[in-house]
Amino acid sequence: MLEARAHAQLKALLRLEGEPRWPHHLTLSRLVARSLRRGDQTLVRLAPGSDPSWLLGLLVPLALAEVPLALVVTPELRQRLLQVELPRLQAAGLQLPCWEGPTAPPPDRLWLLQHADLVAAWRQGLLADRQLVVPEAEALEPQLRRALGVSLDSGDWEALRRSLPAAAASLLALHERLSRRILARPCGPLQQVAIAPEEEAPLRQLLGLLTPLPDPWPQWLAAAGDGWASWAQVDPVLLQWQWLRQPLEPLAAMAGLWEQRGVVLLGQVVEGSGLGFRPQVEVRLADPPLQDPLPLFAPQGQALPNAPHYASHLLEQSRRLVLGQAGLTVVLLDDEGLRRGLASGLAAEFGSRVGHETTAPEANGVLCCSWSWWLEHQGRLPLPCQLVAATLPIASLEDPLTAARVQALRLQGRDWFRELLLPEALGRLQRAVAGLRRSGGRLAVLDGRLRRRGWGRQVLQALEPWVALQRLLPS
């Protein structure tokens, strides 16, 4: 039986390598092996910040399974797989033949797919009855959304006009009209402007009468309906813009992806995340109980992010938090203008110790960055002694994609904040502070909404266990 073979092989490998750092290797291996043998649809929820060595418990049953498989990975996970994990398996005498490319491999080869490759294989019907294994399931929706999306720039408009000389004048007039409307609107800190369906309708009607169209225009034309969001990414200096279109629910746009096939999803997936299927098996593999609660500085009476004095509040509190700290301080703030202003104010106080989104901070440095930047790079940075959440990681409605997703829930009469924005924010927050727990550092939340809004209790529950710091004392 696959479960017994995987258990024995993994146990021998762990014994060879020494004491494992993650406590659930054998459990994960048996779960994955059972799912592969039965063709089940399985969801394994991992604790935020789980040691990355958990991947070994997944790969051993994949190496032993005798069923057609496809492993869907992010670029970072692919690099770790090829450079770290496969050599570990080979050293233990296990082979995991990996196939990469646009054509389907023989059944005995593991098809290694990135998310864009998965979309291409699905569109061409190449997945057949292959079981899908998706680690880092928390990245599945955003990665698929980008892979399914369409991007149009000035070069694409030129290619379209060259391929359709009879319609060149009409296309030029439509582009100029769109450009005037987009560049005349305020684009906010994200430099993005939403494009309404009625604004793109004339272009859709014209292109619907013309064939053939050069890439990527057929994909843009096919991406129609209420399930898609359109916006322009504006360069206010060059007065140029890029047209972006992405699905609101990528797994709905890939209807049938999960049907009649075994699926194993693993990752730091929070409750309420939409993964497009109801698993037959759902297991949570949590880390051992923490001995020490997270020190949390979040006093009452802090300013709200929309308050006029919020920038000065952040600077004053951040300065107090940095004073006396011997290790790395990370300040998280998504508003770029506010973040750069805060970094400048801290640099005036602490000099070259302060950096902005740099991967080489000083040992006692102050790193100012966005939440997404920190989540992407934290694995390659030293563990901080403190994390300062200037604002909670709640997506902004100034982002056209977020606004479109919220509007879709509003039209259904649903609670868009508690069903969409809050669960996603809690997931980002838990992943962001996972390293802080290992380093024994402290968390400071300077966002007044934590104490003044009813949903702040859910944020505090997501951070448990924690202990309140009533005063700032140098550590």
Image (cartoon, rainbow, N blue to C red):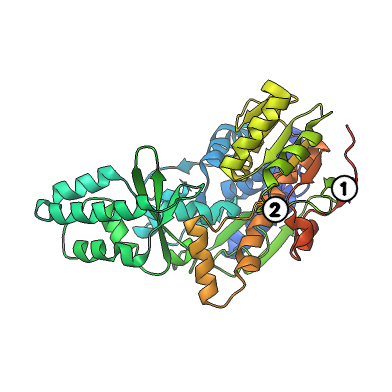
In the image, farthest residue toward the left: 166
Q: For label 1, count other residues whose C-alpha is less than 10 Å away and answer few (under 14), some (14-19) or many (20+).
A: some
Q: Nearer the viewer, mark 2 or mark 1?
A: 1
Q: Secondary structure at mark 1?
A: loop
Quarter of the figure with residue 356: top right
Q: Which residue is labeled 2 in the image?
A: 28
Q: Name the spot of residue 203 as percent of width and height, x first.
A: 24, 61
In the picture, measured across the screen, residue 95 lies left or right of residue 125, that is: right
In the image, farthest residue toward the bottom: 413
Q: Name the spot of residue 165 as percent of width and height, x first.
A: 10, 51
Q: For label 2, count other residues whose C-alpha is less than 10 Å away and answer few (under 14), some (14-19) or many (20+).
A: many
> Considering only vertical position in the picture, is 92 above or below 64?
above
- For residue 293, which numbered disc appears in the image? 1
Of 294 and 124, the residue lying toward us: 294
Identify the mark nearer the N-term, 2 or 1. 2
Q: Label 2 to label 1, Cα distance in Å?
A: 27 Å
On the question of residue 255 being in view, the answer is yes
In the picture, measured across the screen, residue 410 lies left or right of residue 473, that is: left
Question: At label 1, which amino acid type do we have?
Answer: Pro
> Considering only vertical position in the picture, is 306 above or below 350?
below
Q: Residue at x 43, y 67 (%)?
A: 227
Q: Name the spot of residue 156 as percent of width and height, x first.
A: 26, 46
Q: Name the spot of residue 3 as percent of width and height, x first.
A: 67, 55
Of 122 and 430, the residue lying toward us: 430
Q: Residue at x 71, y 54 (%)?
A: 304
Q: Quadrant of the C terminus?
A: top right
Of 215 and 244, the residue lying toward us: 244
In the picture, measured across the screen, residue 230 lies left or right of residue 448, that is: left
